[in-house]
Amino acid sequence: MDKPKKGNTITIKLNGEPKSFREEPQKIAPEPTPEPIPNEIKIDSELHESEGVNEAAAAQESIEESFDWIIPESSENDVEEFTIANSQNFKNSKPKKSLMSFASFSNKNNRRPIGSIVITAVFAILIGLTIGFFMLKLVITESGEKAVTEPNVVGETGNGKEQPETTDKAASAAIEQLNTYVVQGGVFTSKAGAEDTAKQLKSKGIPSEQVEIGGKFYLFLSVADSLETAKSISTKYKDKGAEGAFAKQLMLDEKKLSNLTDNEKSFIESLPSIYQSLSTQVSGALVSSSVSADAGKSEKLKINNIKNENINKMKLELVGADEKVKAFQKSKDTKSLLEAEQHLLNFLSIYNSL
């Protein structure tokens, strides 16, 4: 609701009687608002450009001077005052606490990384020392195992001599291609036909052994160190009843064996040389009826501890031929040489079957 307007009361005494007059505030009529004057500036096109600009500026100044300023009346309502706290005091009071807390916080943060760095460094050193210790121990263990030598096992050979033997180890070896000369008594398409002919020749005192090559059965009567020696032996066998005997060269493929011990590998690698030596001694003795004094002294035949069945069979045949050569040296009996030839033929058959 609007507040009642207060007037000023004046008391006047006339003829001794007081008279009261109430002065009412005069109502001020609102001044009429002047109509807005259009801000049109007419510029004569014939005037010079600078003169037009000057006239426009003069017209603008006259309009501004004639503008009536209306001052609003002051309201009787009191304007509420708002007390604004001093921002300087607020800034000075609050940051002090924050600065102190930040300083203490920064000190704490500075202490924490140093401790964590020290702990990390200590753990890193300990881990490095541990790994280094285990690596050093591993290297020492490996070098110690290599330095330890395995004990040798002493075995006895047939002649009573002792020979060191090494521990069994899995290995592989290959027998080189075997190149030899033989006396051939025939070739057959069936095993039975070759066996029947072999029995007939053996009954005449001629050694023989069948060897299967390429699906055919070859009947061999002798081995030799050369083609000339083989021809000489074939002539002797023809005189005994082997009419189809003839000399030829024989080449047997390379053989590979695995899962061998060290002794077996050593023996396999020396097989070609042992065979060639015995073949030369036996075939030469059949032609010349004499043998060298060094015959029958192959040290490789003294290797023991051979477990492979086929290798052991080949070794037994070679040892048998060697013993027959020694027997011929003593007795000069040609029968010992023929038996030596039979052992060498058996060796070829086993070798070819590998």
Image: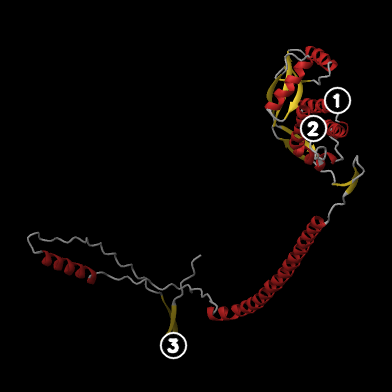
Camera-side residue of 314 and 184: 184
| Place of residue 108 in the rendered image (x, y in percent of width and height, measured from the top left) | 68, 75
Q: Is residue 74 above or below residue 315?
A: below
| Place of residue 79 in the rendered image (x, y in percent of width and height, measured from the top left) | 48, 73
Q: Which residue is mark 3?
A: 16
Whether residue 133 is visible here, answered yes or no, is yes
Which structural element holds mark 1?
Answer: helix
Q: Residues within 10 Å of mark 3 (few under 14, many from 20)?
A: few
Q: Earlier in the sequence, mark 3 or mark 2?
A: 3
Q: Which mark is residue 335?
A: 1
Front: mark 3 or 1: 1
The answer to whether 317 appears left or right of 3 in the picture is right
Camera-side residue of 255 and 44: 255
- In the picture as drawn, the residue positioned furthest to the left comes out as 46
| Place of residue 282 in the rendered image (x, y in percent of width and height, measured from the top left) | 78, 30
The answer to whether 193 appears left or right of 62 in the picture is right
Tell me the amino acid under the disc marked 1.
Answer: Lys
Q: CA distance from mark 3 to mark 1?
A: 199 Å
Front: mark 3 or 2: 2
Front: mark 2 or 1: 2
Tell me the amino acid under the disc marked 3.
Answer: Gly
| Contact flag, marks 3 and 2 (Cβ < 8 Å) | no
Q: Is residue 2 above or below residue 307?
A: below
| Contact flag, marks 3 and 1 (Cβ < 8 Å) | no
Q: Which mark is residue 290?
A: 2
Q: CA distance from mark 3 to mark 2?
A: 199 Å
Quadrant location of the C terminus in the rendered image: top right
